[in-house]
Amino acid sequence: MAGKQIDIPPKGLNTTYGAVFGYPAANEAITYPPGWAHKAGLELIGITGVDEFMVIGVGKTMPVIKYNDGLVVGYFNSKGEPVWFPASEYQQNYGLSVGSFLDAKNCKNIAVENIAIDGNNTPISAGGKTFYNGGWDLELIQKGATGTSFLNTQNVTLKKLDIHHMTLDAVLFQDFYKDTLAYKNQPLSNLYISDIKCDYNRRQGFSWCGGRKPTVMNSTFNHTGTTTSGIAGGNPAAGLDIEPEADGISLLLCVDGTFTNFEFINNKGCGLVNDGNTSIINKGKNVEIISMSGMIFKGSKDQKKPYTFNLQGNTILS
């Protein structure tokens, strides 16, 4: 079982991962100042600056990583009371999250294969055991756990995975790929995804927030946001969200992606959202080009149709 959450006393917390998990050699600090939420979630696997790392399931059946019952997600004060505020007053310290299965930062050559990750996310209001409260106006609750999260990381392979019922996304990929006129000789991101299922997650099947040359084949991004309702929802509840963000200084690009043979079925939001507002290709135009083929969209009229086309600019398909 995964998704360990620890209590944070009102006076704050200063400890180590070793003290929490019972491994004295794990001496990385865990520090929460006074005034934060009353709990915090810890990553199951967190790596930083690693040049090669693999998580590969073996055996006759696919190994399953299942999150704990009774996880708490949302925005709370140090007394455990829910906090509500408009986006303009959002304060990160109130956010109560759940640790991701794998969180990789500033890494290279990562492979995850042949594993099922069950986020065990169904809110109490829908008969489940995940407790949601507090909120951020318009955006609802943007906290939780992602199955696999990659920040400024290149050469990632994800194969034969089943990531479902996560409290955030199945996959989040944000490589720091920037304007090629200002930043020369950047390495390709080289994300390769093949034969994975990213279904029944709360916020996104796949969030692509920066990077060049991802390849996605034979995969599904279905039923996002359909297992939650009310404040437990997470915008935009899309199958795939292409949303280039920033590295704290410069805007990032999402470019040269290839998607072949995949599904967007019955997502609460759009099947695919292409924000495109920070994607700039050489000429400085607000344009993003992604080649896609063999796509299946299935909407409210239960239509099923293959598409082959290019997407340019700010595009939303539902």
Image: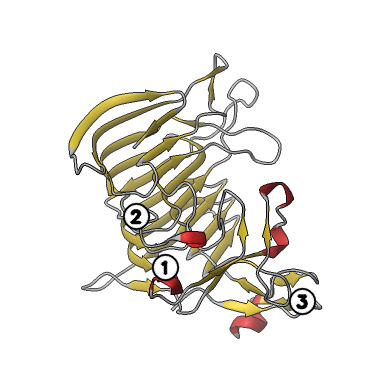
Residue at left offset 68%, top offset 65%: 83
The quadrant where residue 80 appears? bottom right
The secondary structure type at the circle numbered 1 is: loop
Residue toward you, 76 or 19: 76
Which residue corresponds to mark 1? Answer: 119
The secondary structure type at the circle numbered 2 is: loop
Q: Whole-percent x and y of residue 317?
A: 35, 34
Residue toward you, 43 or 201: 201
Q: Earlier in the sequence, mark 1 or mark 3?
A: 3
The image shows residue 48, relative to residue 296, as above or below, that is below
Residue 198 tag number: 2
* Distance Cα–Cα, label 1 vs label 2: 11 Å
* Distance Cα–Cα, label 1 vs label 3: 28 Å
From where the camera sits, is residue 146 visible?
no
Residue toward you, 19 or 65: 65
What amino acid is found at the position of numbered circle 1 in the picture?
Answer: Gly
Relative placement, left or right, of 208 versus 277 is left
Q: Whole-percent x and y of residue 251?
A: 63, 32
Within 10 Å of disc 2 (Cα), the crowding (few <14, some 14-19, many 20+) is many
What amino acid is found at the position of numbered circle 3 in the picture?
Answer: Asn
